[in-house]
């Protein structure tokens, strides 16, 4: 019994890893073809959909170390996609805000990204996608509770 569980756990790990690798490689290629790296896209996508964000909170929202955020924001700012805006009520806080150019760029890029994701996930029915979301979420949440 334990050996069967071990084999299925290993197989699930391999299947999830391979699926992640293929999806990750495909989306990274798309970003590169459009002049971005995945982190730059993640920052732009966050600002595009959620609006102005404190620089100090961007890293947590896109799962990136705070030191890297400054570098990414600098690059996007040089390209005219975002700007830094000081907080009027708290001088310690600086916001990142998407610019008109960044919005226009994302207006044409994001629908293509969405289409790519539809194609990448196309092997699953809508019901299967919803089931996969719940199962993977359950797995992720249960792992947070484990301690080694």
Image (tube, rainbow, N blue to C red):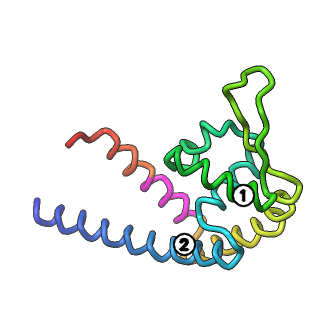
Residue 25 belongs to the span the image colors magenta: no
Residue shown at the point (77%, 62%) measured from the top left:
79
- Left or right: residue 39 versus residue 86 is left
- Left or right: residue 72 versus residue 82 is left
Q: Residue furthest top?
A: 89
Q: Name which quarter of the figure residue 110 lies in.
A: bottom right
Q: Position of residue 33 (x, y in %)?
A: 68, 79
Residue 105, disc: none
The image quadrant where one finds the N terminus is: bottom left
The image quadrant where one finds the C terminus is: top left
Q: Which residue is mark 2?
A: 124
Q: Which residues are magenta?
A: 127-136
Q: Which residue is mark 1?
A: 76
Q: Name which quarter of the figure residue 84 lies in.
A: top right
- Left or right: residue 17 versus residue 52 is left
Q: Nearer the viewer, residue 13 or 135?
A: 13
Callout 1 secondary element: helix
* Alpha-carbon span between mark 2 and mark 1: 35 Å
């Amino acid at each position: 019994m334990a050996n069967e569980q071990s084999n299925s756990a290993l197989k699930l790990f391999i299947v999830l890893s391979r699926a992640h690798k293929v999806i990750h490689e495909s989306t990274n290629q798309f970003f590169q073809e459009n002049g971005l790296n995945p982190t730059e896209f993640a920052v732009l996508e966050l600002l595009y959909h959620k609006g102005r964000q404190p620089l100090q909170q961007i890293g947590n929202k896109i799962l990136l170390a705070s030191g890297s955020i400054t570098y990414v924001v600098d690059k996007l700012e040089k390209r005219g996609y975002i700007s830094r805006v000081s907080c009027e009520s708290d001088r310690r806080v600086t916001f990142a805000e998407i610019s008109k150019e960044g919005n226009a760029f994302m207006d044409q890029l994001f629908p293509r990204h969405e289409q790519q994701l539809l194609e990448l996930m196309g092997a699953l029915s809508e019901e299967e996608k919803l089931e996969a979301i719940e199962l993977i979420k359950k797995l992720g949440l249960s792992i947070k509770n484990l301690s080694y």
